[in-house]
């Protein structure tokens, strides 16, 4: 039985049981579970002949960054006792991308040291052979072993042992980190897939057959800034999303049979879902190669749901392979600092020593923003307990552009497969899209698909800039191609709340106007209504204990216009929790 927790503060409640709040990011035992995951739906009904009829549905999955927060990101300048997990005994820092690069570096270093050790041992034996006959004549017994005191050999041996230990430690840390990040991303992607199934319009438009042939498109929209800890989160998320390509999803009607085979005993019950009974994840290797590992995820559904809601192309053991793409664009003051090549935290501290910020050339009109003279602490954090390090440490103003170019290439390949532009070729006859070089050595460079030209132009214009239109066009393209979308920032509550309400406002206005080009003023007005009266403020309270968005005046000043929060919702102070 679930105890009554109505007297407990909302953000401290542990019901519903499957929900993991953002303040549990540091819990190692929960590191493989996505946190603050919500399936946000918007339903539009119309009144016809006195009766209300459902007209349109919009789904987005919102969540925190799929990264190994519990392991940390080894940010320099931060208390290592609270963020040392990413480096531990390996000496490496950052998220998976940097750690993988460091692992390659260690492997090369170890290979060079071993070569040096072999070379030194060979030189030792060669030199000893020159004196062998003289020693034998003198009656000295020759040893086939290398004495421990040879300087060159001892040097290479000790260095090789030290490097091998660092490499092994880092390899283990990467394996554990990949498992945690992949597990989070998989749960989020499956949530998007099941949400798309629940939306009957996807089946009516024939998308199910496209998913079965070409894969289910799931677009991750990241709002992280490429500096400090959030740079590590971007690196983790990019690898986790890429790993989703290995997953094939099979929907199964649960017959309730108690007698299970050995393989079926691996089923994990889903206790709190009215429709999903269990899940089972198994791995297999194509062509006998571990580098080609694939995963088969079976989802056991209630028979009535399976029969009534699952489209025919997805029944009878049909496997749907995930086609994940990631687009990333920082939208806050931290990203502004990265683009400007400046350390935001240092500037704020320097300019506040005299009693407030006063440099208009650096911060524009921000110095006139109410609350700017209230001190430096907390000016650029979002109220989480582990904010230290978010704006310090290494910055990378290239990673977002690189990820967006890679995401476009993948999305472009998918668009050409499901919506061919070649005469005489249909989606049913076109070849499945090529994800990356692991599937085909030579990846063909395709011209931008007509649907993706706006996205292509936005990405070209985004180098070194805070270009929110990249996410806007990516989301619109994904919707036109029948895919699902997810939105995330660090915690999945504040920046994510602004983005999802903006997308919903666009959806509403396009439905009303029946056209793609709609009024920005109307969209902003509807987004403001959703941000004030919708479900995002309660989500903030559920996670942080404050029924407000965790933006302060300085943060709001630097956000893109379409993501600026209503002032009434941001009179925020950091909660004691």
Image: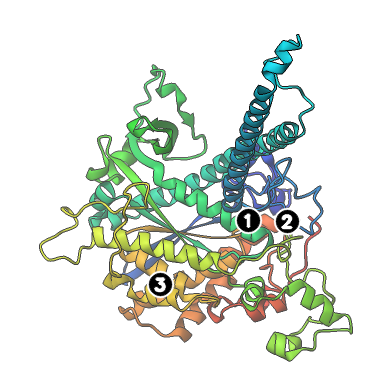
- Total label count? 3
Q: Residue 473: which numbered mark, if any?
A: 3
Q: Earlier in the sequence, mark 2 or mark 1?
A: 2
In the rendered structure, the answer to whether residue 568 lies left or right of residue 50 reads right
Q: Which residue position is annotated with label 1?
A: 232
Please state which of the two labelled residues, at mark 3 or mark 1, is closer to the viewer. Answer: 1
Residue 322 % position (x, y): 37, 48
Label 3 environment density (alpha carbons within 10 Å; few <14, some 14–19, many ≥20): many
Q: Classify 450 as above or below 113.
A: below
Q: Quadrant of residue 424?
A: bottom left
Which residue position is annotated with label 2? 75
Q: CA distance from mark 3 to mark 1?
A: 25 Å
* Local crowd size for mark 1, using a 10 Å CA cut-off: few (<14), some (14–19), many (≥20): many
SS assignment at label 2: loop
Q: Point out residue 320 in the picture as x, y percentages from the top left corner.
A: 32, 44
Distance, label 2 to label 3, CA atoms, is 33 Å
**Which is nearer the N-term, disc 2 or disc 3?**
2
Q: Nearer the viewer, residue 94 or 352?
A: 94
């Amino acid at each position: 039985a679930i105890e009554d927790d109505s007297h407990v503060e909302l953000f401290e409640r542990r019901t519903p049981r499957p929900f993991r709040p953002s303040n549990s990011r540091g819990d190692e035992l929960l590191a493989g579970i996505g946190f603050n995951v919500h399936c946000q739906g918007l339903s539009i009904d119309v009144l016809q002949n006195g009766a209300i009829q459902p007209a349109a549905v919009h789904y987005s999955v919102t969540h925190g960054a799929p990264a190994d927060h519990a392991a940390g990101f080894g940010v320099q300048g931060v208390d290592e006792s609270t963020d040392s997990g990413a480096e531990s005994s390996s000496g490496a820092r950052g998220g998976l991308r940097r750690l993988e690069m460091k692992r390659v570096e260690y492997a090369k270093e170890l290979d060079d040291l071993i070569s040096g050790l072999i070379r030194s041992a060979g030189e030792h034996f060669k030199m000893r052979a020159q004196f062998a006959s003289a020693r034998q004549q003198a009656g000295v017994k020759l040893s086939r072993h290398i004495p421990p005191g040879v300087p060159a050999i001892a040097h290479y041996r000790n260095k090789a042992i030290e490097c091998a230990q660092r490499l092994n430690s880092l390899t283990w840390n990467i394996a554990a980190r990949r498992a945690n990040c992949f597990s989070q991303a998989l749960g989020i992607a499956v949530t998007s897939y099941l949400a798309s199934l629940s939306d009957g319009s996807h089946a009516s438009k024939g998308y199910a057959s496209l998913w079965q042939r070409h894969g289910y498109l799931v677009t991750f929209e990241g709002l992280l800034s490429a500096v400090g800890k959030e740079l590590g989160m971007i690196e983790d998320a990019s690898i986790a999303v890429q790993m989703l390509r290995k997953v094939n999803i099979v929907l199964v009607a649960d017959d309730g049979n108690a007698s299970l085979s050995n393989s079926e005993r691996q089923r994990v019950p889903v206790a709190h879902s009215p429709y999903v009974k269990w899940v089972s994840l198994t791995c297999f290797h194509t062509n006998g190669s571990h580098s080609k590992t694939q995963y088969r995820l079976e989802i056991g559904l209630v028979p009535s749901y399976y029969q009534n809601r699952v489209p025919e192309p997805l029944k009878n053991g049909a496997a749907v392979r995930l086609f994940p793409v990631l687009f990333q664009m920082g939208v806050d003051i931290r990203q502004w600092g990265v683009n400007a090549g400046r350390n935001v935290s240092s500037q704020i501290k320097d300019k506040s020593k005299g009693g407030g910020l006063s440099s208009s050339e650096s911060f524009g009109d921000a110095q006139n923003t109410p609350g700017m003279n209230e001190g430096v602490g907390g000016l650029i954090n979002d109220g989480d307990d582990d904010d230290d390090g978010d704006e310090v440490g290494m910055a990378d103003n290239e990673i977002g552009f690189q990820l967006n170019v890679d995401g476009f290439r993948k999305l472009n390949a998918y668009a050409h497969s499901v919506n061919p532009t070649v005469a005489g070729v249909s989606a049913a006859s076109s070849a499945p899209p090529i994800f990356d070089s692991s599937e085909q050595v030579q990846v063909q460079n395709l011209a931008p698909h007509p649907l993706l030209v706006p996205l292509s132009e936005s990405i070209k214009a985004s180098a070194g800039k805070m270009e929110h239109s990249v996410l806007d066009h990516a989301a619109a393209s994904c919707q036109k191609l029948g895919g699902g979308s997810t939105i995330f920032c660090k915690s999945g509550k504040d920046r994510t709340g602004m983005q999802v309400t903006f997308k919903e406002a666009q959806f509403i206005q396009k439905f009303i106007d029946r056209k793609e080009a709609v009024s920005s003023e109307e969209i902003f007005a509807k987004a403001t209504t959703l941000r004030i009266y919708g479900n995002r403020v309660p989500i903030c309270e559920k996670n942080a204990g404050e029924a407000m968005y965790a933006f302060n005046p300085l943060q709001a000043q630097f956000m893109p216009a379409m993501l600026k929060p209503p002032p009434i919702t941001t009179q925020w102070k950091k909660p004691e929790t």
